[in-house]
Amino acid sequence: MPDAPQPEPTPPPAAAAPAGGPPPGMPPQQGQPMRSGAVLGAPGFNPNADKEYYRFLMSGVVMFLGCMMPWGPEWSMAGYKTLSGALFTLIAIGMIWSWWGAIATARFSGANLKWVGLSLIPFIACLQAILTAFSSAAVTDFVDAGKAMPEGWGEFFSAMFDSLPLFGGDEVAGEKVSNFLRAFGGGQIVVFFGALYAEFAFFLAIMGGAKHAKKQKAEAAASGRGARRSGGGGGGKSGRK
């Protein structure tokens, strides 16, 4: 009598995928869950980061914006197209890049402070340009051409307020402000305020650190006095016993 046909062996059941791992048969690098800090970009907000980090980041953004703006009477004459403007753009990118990373990790290093120190370069250079703005070649050319122009920063700010609709909306004052900004270029002014904000934020960080250290010192002194009192009280009781 012929033997009965044997049933074909059934394949073993596929192993279940580990929790959080890729499905069976898929390479490990595929199907893996995206984790913040590993695959996703560094977050621009971290509740554990100090507020000074955001101030430094904002100062870099403002300086970068000023480098993209005109630095002279020609609209195409952006700041980054000049040698000094290219250097300021590099410093602004360094501020954004380093402090964005500091926000993501909630810590900073000496490299971050290096960019804050380098921000003194655009601060001093733009301050010098602002102080000599009304004697610059572009501004004097506008004056020689007969265009309305303020004679100094005092008249400039006065004309700027007079040109606002809230204060009467003087058209002549508005023309003076517009002509000066067109001749001088608003980019250097924006870079100056961005660098000034960086140094101001650094000053606030120093003051905040000193205040925090003083508070810690006072707490340590109070804790030491409390420990001495408790130790002295315990010794007196044991002596009476």
Image (cartoon, grey):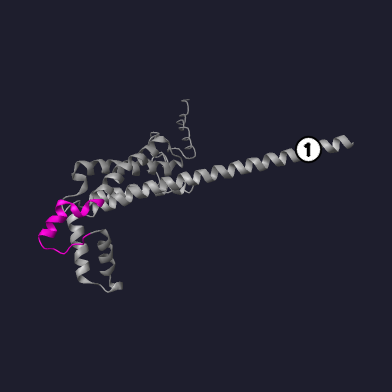
Quarter where residue 225 is shown: top right
- Give residue 86's position: percent from left, percent from top: 23, 42
The residue sitting at 27% across, 61% down in the picture is 154
Query: Foreground residue, 103 or 190?
Result: 190
Tell me: 88 left or right of 236.
left
Tell me: residue 50, above or below residue 13: below
Quarter where residue 174 is shown: bottom left
- Give residue 136's position: percent from left, percent from top: 17, 51
- Give residue 37's position: percent from left, percent from top: 42, 40
The residue sitting at 25% across, 66% down in the picture is 159
Residue 146: say if magenta: yes
**What amino acid type should be assigned to the residue bearing mark 1?**
Gly
Secondary structure beneath label 1: helix
Residue 97: say if magenta: no
Tell me: 92 left or right of 213.
left
**Magenta range:** 130-151
Residue at the far left in the pictured view: 145
Q: Which residue is mark 1?
A: 232
Is residue 218 visible in the rendered structure shown here? yes
Tell me: 108 left or right of 90.
right
Tell me: 20 left or right of 133.
right
- Give residue 103's position: percent from left, percent from top: 42, 44
The residue sitting at 19% across, 66% down in the picture is 175
User: Which quadrant is the C terminus positioned in?
Assistant: top right
Query: Foreground residue, 50 or 146?
Result: 146
